[in-house]
Amino acid sequence: MSTIKDVAKEACVSIATVSRVINKSPKASKSAIDAVTNAMNKLAYRPNAAAKALVSQNTNTIGVLVGDVSDPFFGTLIKTVDTVAQQNGKHTLIGNGYHDHQQELEAIELLINNRCEALIIHSKALSDDELISYANEIKGLVLINRHIEKLADRCISLDNYKGAYLATEYLIRHGHTKIACIASNHPIEDTDERRLGYLAALQDNGIKLSKDYIESGTPDSEGGEMAMTNLLTKSIEMTGVVAYNDHMAAGVLSVAHENGIQVPEKLSIIGFDDVLIARYLYPRLTTVRYPIEMMAEKAAILALKLASGESIEPEAMHFTPTIVRRDSVGKRN
Amino acid sequence: MSTIKDVAKEACVSIATVSRVINKSPKASKSAIDAVTNAMNKLAYRPNAAAKALVSQNTNTIGVLVGDVSDPFFGTLIKTVDTVAQQNGKHTLIGNGYHDHQQELEAIELLINNRCEALIIHSKALSDDELISYANEIKGLVLINRHIEKLADRCISLDNYKGAYLATEYLIRHGHTKIACIASNHPIEDTDERRLGYLAALQDNGIKLSKDYIESGTPDSEGGEMAMTNLLTKSIEMTGVVAYNDHMAAGVLSVAHENGIQVPEKLSIIGFDDVLIARYLYPRLTTVRYPIEMMAEKAAILALKLASGESIEPEAMHFTPTIVRRDSVGKRN
DNA sequence: ATAATAAATGAAAGCGATTACAAAAATGAC
DNA sequence: GTCATTTTTGTAATCGCTTTCATTTATTAT
């Protein structure tokens, strides 16, 4: 692959001139521009990004760490960040952590080694201290979907408690009182926050339910199926289910189908996240909207500001979810 | 951010020694390893990937161009490539083309400028000639989901014709003869191939249908809804529908629901691709499986081989789809 | 103890670009 | 046509790292 030197030789100018043409510097004559352009085309010249980054000390890159690109939730997050990046003349480097400590570590270090100016981190497996340490090292680092008090102004997070509260309350307002909770068994803060929100809504409405109404499983449709099956096995009287997320809700839904329990006539179900599949389920899933685009956009803009040393005025970093009404919740009969 | 020089000074050794320690060269004394390791930790040293790439002339990076990361189909493709990359000690750089000519161009050039050793390209908007030109330039370039005769041994593609043929035949074997086709209106080869497959299956089974049985729309659920609505409006007698893809099938399904047409009792529907949502639809969608993981893995391995100049024996680059039996197709009654 | 060999280290060149600075060429004023 | 000014160009240093080659230090054989 040809270098700037080859182009210079071909165009009979110095490499400085070639560089000027490439970077559209004003101090380049028309004739130089032509000669260099021709030479570049002839040689199919490609400026070496590494060399450029090295000397100019900037990569124009914004890094994103996600759990798993193949999950549409993260796909949306990445796409949003990428859009903001493009608007700022930057591009995006993606790291997959696969929710594993070691892999998250490696992915984040790769992003740092590549000198990403800004970093959007969605971490499940790293400890607060590890993240704080990275944050101190990289000024353009922002956390998304996680709240660490010491990093409060660099965390974009969702009020999970409020979301679950809203979901539960929504069922209550529809006349339900026997409301089961399908929780996640992943040891992350979201799990607890959502369970607490459910509990609080119950309590605030004077509803007392035994612990049997809470069942948990892996936060996917299989986990939802398992948990729902357990609930049915326990012969619990219930007319509503608050699921940890849409995938678990999907599992609940299929178990309900299989058992001839009509949704929403006999059972109302509410999910959480409003991921792609929610609107494809039958009945279309009423759920709590996780405003990931809005949050990712905010995160990207914030990260860019922090990276450029721009002063930031403290603003709302904590997002509030909202209910998406669809067809899986009905009035209790 | 500290450099190798800082580490060398801190550890009282030369930068050459630091480099040897970093790269685990055998010729580094125990004492040097200790001193350097301590210095690196103390300074939170991060090797500059750009500098390393520049001098060593390799980036250990494999680039992927996809349409849109937020689409789970591409997410799966990326994840698979990333897995292969990791197994080979490489990492993955992702480009989004958004099915737009200009953006695909920019994305692919970014990947080239970053000196990706191998390139997996999923392009919809670039012409054959453009792709051939890139392929001649980058020896580790492989096309996926596209077939260009001149690049035959570097194209990993799916037999769309066969897939649609299979789908149609599957309905025919279930007793259907009045089978509509919901086609895509995107001007890419897949569209034609799938329509041709449908037509051929009909013909081979002696079924003659008017052109009215083919309706097209955008390849998403809205397009599917529109096309299905048109079909119903035309009062066409039909008991089966072959959809261009699962998203369109989802649209067909919802229009069927709204019109009280029971699936599969009154209408059988078969999709294409077997994307994430297929198993979440109601009824669960019978579809044609697009073996994207298998194909992406093959593509990644091939690209890596080509990049390293390894000779490749010609093998099957053309994949055949298979039917995924679920619940949206029934015997004609 | 000494020579021969092996192991560890450092100095310096170079990867491909940008850019400060100086020099050369072009332009304009008179 | 001359001199001052502006525009254009080239030289050389530099970014952070790897690696060759020469040199120093440690090890082994005799």
Image (cartoon, coloured by chain):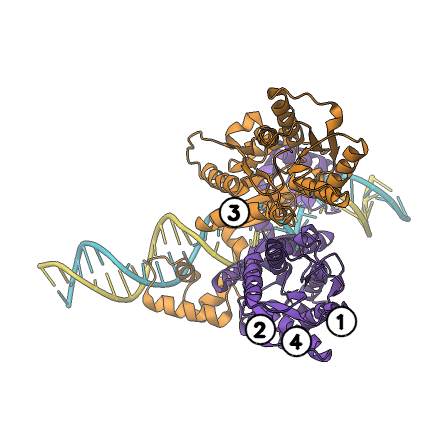
Chain colours: A orange, B purple, C yellow, D cyan
Task: Tell me if residue A330 comes above or below residue B268 in the rendering.
Answer: above
Q: Which disc is residue A192 wearing?
A: none
Name the amino acid, label 2.
Asp
What distance separates the C-alpha of mark 1 from that of mark 4? Answer: 29 Å
Q: Earlier in the sequence, mark 1 or mark 2?
A: 2
Q: Residues within 10 Å of mark 4 (few under 14, many from 20)?
A: many
CB-based contact (under 8 Å), mark 3 and mark 4: no
Q: Are marks 3 and 4 on the same chain?
A: no
Q: Are marks 2 and 3 on the same chain?
A: no
Residue placed under numbered mark 4 in the picture: B199
CB-based contact (under 8 Å), mark 2 and mark 3: no
- Tell us which disc is closer to us: 3 or 1: 3
Name the amino acid, label 1.
Glu
Of all chains, the one bearing label 1 is B
Q: Which disc is residue A80 wearing?
A: 3
Q: Residue at x 57, y 73 (%)?
A: B212
What distance separates the C-alpha of mark 3 from that of mark 4? Answer: 40 Å
What distance separates the C-alpha of mark 3 from that of mark 1? Answer: 39 Å
Name the amino acid, label 3.
Thr
Q: Are marks 1 and 2 on the same chain?
A: yes
Q: Residue D15, percent across and down?
A: 51, 46
Q: Are marks 3 and 1 on the same chain?
A: no
Horizontal relation, residue A314 to residue B187: left or right:
left
Q: Residues within 10 Å of mark 3 (few under 14, many from 20)?
A: many
Task: Tell me if residue A102 comes above or below residue A276 in the rendering.
Answer: above
Q: Are marks 2 and 4 on the same chain?
A: yes
Q: Earlier in the sequence, mark 1 or mark 4?
A: 4
Of all chains, the one bearing label 3 is A
What distance separates the C-alpha of mark 2 from that of mark 3? Answer: 41 Å
Task: Tell me if residue B15 comes above or below residue B305 in the rendering.
Answer: above
Residue placed under numbered mark 2 in the picture: B212
Q: Which disc is residue B315 wearing?
A: 1
